[in-house]
Image (tube, rainbow, N blue to C red):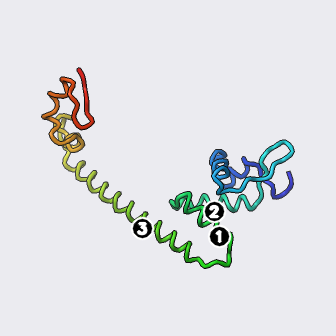
């Protein structure tokens, strides 16, 4: 192979991307299809390497495939205003902040659960109790008889 031409394996190693992922990005149009050798092997160029690196970094930052596609399209016209890219990044930042808030609430809840569970048996475990549906103790007898409640069913 001539200089500047990469096989899919080399491209995968240089970008730390699985071969299947590269094929997926080609199939969904994020990465242009490469030319083929006489043996029908994919033959990538430096432009593919650069574009795949952009895609990988975008995905590492949590941008969706559609957001990544839009930013790639915008990056193809270097003279354009970056306001559209800024809007995408701002939207994503809001999404990240919402996820952080949700994870913070989750952490607080888990922390409370761990702090109250200092008993010796599962029957007295406050974590198990807090994960169980409200009133589960009242339902145990009915469940043993094969009755279903709110998605729980059992037949003994």
Q: Compute the Cα span from label 1 to label 2.
A: 10 Å
Kindly state the secondary structure of the residue where label 1 is placed. helix
Dot 2 crowding, Cα within 10 Å, few <14, some 14–19, many 20+: some
* Label 3 close to label 2 by CB (< 8 Å): no
Q: Position of residue 35 (x, y in %)?
A: 80, 52
Name the one closer to the observer, 113 or 145.
145
- Asked if residue 90 is positioned above or below residue 11 in the image, the reply reads below
Q: Residue furthest left?
A: 138
Displayed quadrant of residue 79: bottom right
Q: Position of residue 68 (x, y in %)?
A: 58, 62
Kindly state the secondary structure of the residue where label 3 is placed. helix
Q: Is residue 6 left or right of residue 23?
A: right
Residue on which the image places disc 1: 75
- Asked if residue 54 is positioned above or below residue 144 in the image, the reply reads below
Residue on which the image places disc 3: 94
Residue on which the image places disc 2: 54
Q: Compute the Cα span from label 1 to label 3.
A: 22 Å
């Amino acid at each position: 192979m001539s200089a500047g031409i990469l096989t899919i394996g080399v491209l995968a190693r240089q970008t730390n991307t699985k071969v299947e992922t590269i094929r997926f990005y080609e199939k969904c149009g994020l990465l242009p299809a490469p030319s083929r050798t006489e043996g029908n092997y994919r033959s990538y160029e430096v432009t593919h390497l650069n574009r795949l690196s952009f895609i990988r970094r975008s995905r590492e930052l949590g941008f969706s495939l559609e957001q990544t596609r839009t930013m790639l399209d915008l990056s193809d016209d270097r003279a354009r205003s970056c306001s559209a890219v800024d809007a995408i990044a701002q939207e994503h930042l809001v999404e990240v902040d919402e996820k952080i808030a949700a994870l913070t609430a989750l952490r607080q809840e888990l922390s409370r659960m761990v702090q109250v569970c200092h008993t010796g048996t599962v029957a007295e475990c406050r974590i198990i109790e807090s994960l169980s549906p409200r009133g589960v103790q009242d339902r145990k007898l009915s469940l043993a008889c094969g009755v279903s409640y709110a998605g729980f069913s059992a037949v003994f």
